[in-house]
Image (cartoon, rainbow, N blue to C red):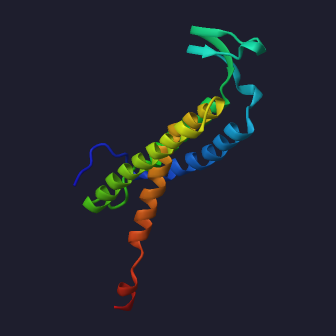
Amino acid sequence: METRFLLPNKLKQPGWIILIPSGILGVLAIFFNLEWNFLKMKVFAIYSEGVSFLGGSTVVCGFDKVNVTATIIGIFFLIGSVMVAFSKEKYEDEFIAKIRLESLLWATYINYAILFLCFIFFYGIGFLYVMILNMFTILILFIIRFNYVIYRTSKPSQNEKQS
């Protein structure tokens, strides 16, 4: 079975090489306010709102000076996770396609269950952090479950070992 929209298998390894460091840097950026000063630059923004009591201003369709550390880390994380999640396996068959579909469905259900709970229990700026993390959770959950199921099904069972 030919799946038309998957990336070539050769992109999976570079995807992991991009995903792991950007994931670590993303955690540092979100939870420990990692920002590199050399990445403060003037960028075009459709909408940018600074913190008003700190002298920030609102820009609509114009240029604003911001630190783009989190933006760059987020872009690399998305590129890496898409490469890992949607690259073909070495041997892509109907069974892999079934696992891929089930993993995506499972990740979607879990993602929205988590989001539902966050709507109930997070408010204010905490909810903003939840929404930032929610952009990535469906890909993370998919990658974890898909690779776990592939690993689990590739191990020989006890009955196969005895034969």
Query: Residue farthest to the front?
Result: 120
Residue sitting at x 28%, y 62%: 95
Residue 54 x %, y %: 77, 15
Q: Would residue 114 be found to the left or right of residue 162 on screen?
A: right
Q: Would residue 59 be found to the left or right of residue 161 on screen?
A: right
Above or below: residue 81 compared with residue 58: below
> Visible in this render: residue 60?
yes
Looking at the picture, tell me which residue is in the foreground, 23 or 31.
Answer: 31
Image quadrant containing the N terminus: bottom left
Q: Would residue 67 be found to the left or right of residue 59 on screen?
A: right
Query: Residue farthest to the left?
Result: 1
Give the image quarter of residue 98.
bottom left
Above or below: residue 77 compared with residue 142: above
Residue 10 x %, y %: 43, 51
Residue sitting at x 76%, y 11%: 55
Residue sitting at x 53%, y 51%: 16
Looking at the picture, tell me which residue is in the foreground, 81 or 122.
Answer: 122
Q: Would residue 112 be found to the left or right of residue 105 on screen?
A: right
Query: Residue farthest to the bottom?
Result: 162
Above or below: residue 87 compared with residue 115: below
Give the image quarter of residue 100.
bottom left
> Visible in this render: residue 44?
no
Residue 26 x %, y %: 64, 41
Count of numbered labels shown in the rendering: 0
Residue 39 x %, y %: 70, 26
Above or below: residue 78 compared with residue 102: above
Residue sitting at x 50%, y 48%: 140
Image quadrant containing the C terminus: bottom left
